[in-house]
């Protein structure tokens, strides 16, 4: 189920013309949800959405086999980095058209400046490979509040799941 909305404001008219306009508006809403080729708002996928696949336990999966020098992963006295804004997320057209929902999980380093360090972005897993590239683009474009160690910003390794839901407002690529 995708959200769609339409706003209709009929022009001023009187008598029979008003009745005809109201009947036409009701018929348009009954037949096409108020959507037309001229004025269109958010359009849902053409098929019924498939259920969201669950994200399995990935706690034992390691994408970085060696520690990254100078990068925190966790520890005592460390305030973790937090997501401020996810980068632009575009729904893959093929997935949209087939009603696919899914996810991709990434490991990456957030620098002391709050930006994702492009050298350290790794796919952990995805429900379908179609979601990997747009999720990676969203991760790379994200903004974070950096980790803090001893009162100073510090780079930190994070893991983030990115979900693609058809019932939310989404932009197709």
Image (cartoon, rainbow, N blue to C red):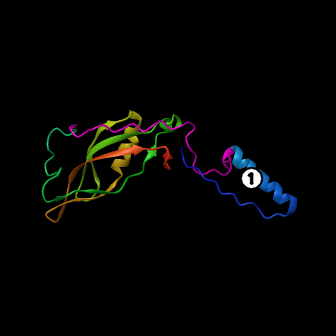
SS assignment for the magenta stretch, majority:
loop
Q: Is residue 134 magenta?
A: no
Quick one: SS at disc 1? helix
On the image, numbered disc 1 is attached to which residue? Answer: 25
Q: Position of residue 72 (x, y in %)?
A: 16, 52
| Residue at x 16% of width, y 46% of height | 68
Relative horizontal placement of residue 37, taking residue 164 as reference (left or right): right
Residue drawn where x is 60% and y is 53% of the image: 5
The one of 15 and 93 positioned closer to us in this rendering:
15
In the depicted view, which residue is nearer to us: 65 or 77?
77
For the point 71% across and 44% down, which residue is it?
A: 31
Residue 78 horizontal/vertical position (percent): 16, 58
Quarter of the N terminus within the rendering: top right
Query: Mark 1, residues whose alpha carbon is within 10 Å: few (<14), some, or many (≥20)?
Result: some
- In the rendered image, residue 2, in percent from the top left (x then y), is placed at 54, 46
From the viewer's perspective, is 156 left or right of 96? left
């Amino acid at each position: 189920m995708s959200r769609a909305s339409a706003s209709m404001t009929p022009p001023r008219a009187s008598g029979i013309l008003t009745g005809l306009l109201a009947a036409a508006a009701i018929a348009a809403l009954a037949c096409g949800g108020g959507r037309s080729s001229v004025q269109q708002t958010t359009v849902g996928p053409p098929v019924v959405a498939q259920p969201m696949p669950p994200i399995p336990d990935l706690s034992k999966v390691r994408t970085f086999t060696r520690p990254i020098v100078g990068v925190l992963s966790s520890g005592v006295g460390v305030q973790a980095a937090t997501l401020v804004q996810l980068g632009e997320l575009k729904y893959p057209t093929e997935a949209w058209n087939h009603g696919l929902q899914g996810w991709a999980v990434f490991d990456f380093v957030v620098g002391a400046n709050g930006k994702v360090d492009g050298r350290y972005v790794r796919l952990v897993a995805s429900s379908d490979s179609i979601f990997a590239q747009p999720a990676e683009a969203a991760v790379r474009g994200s903004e974070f509040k950096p980790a803090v160690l001893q009162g100073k910003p510090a780079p930190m390794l994070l893991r983030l799941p990115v979900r693609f839901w058809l019932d939310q407002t989404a932009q197709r690529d």
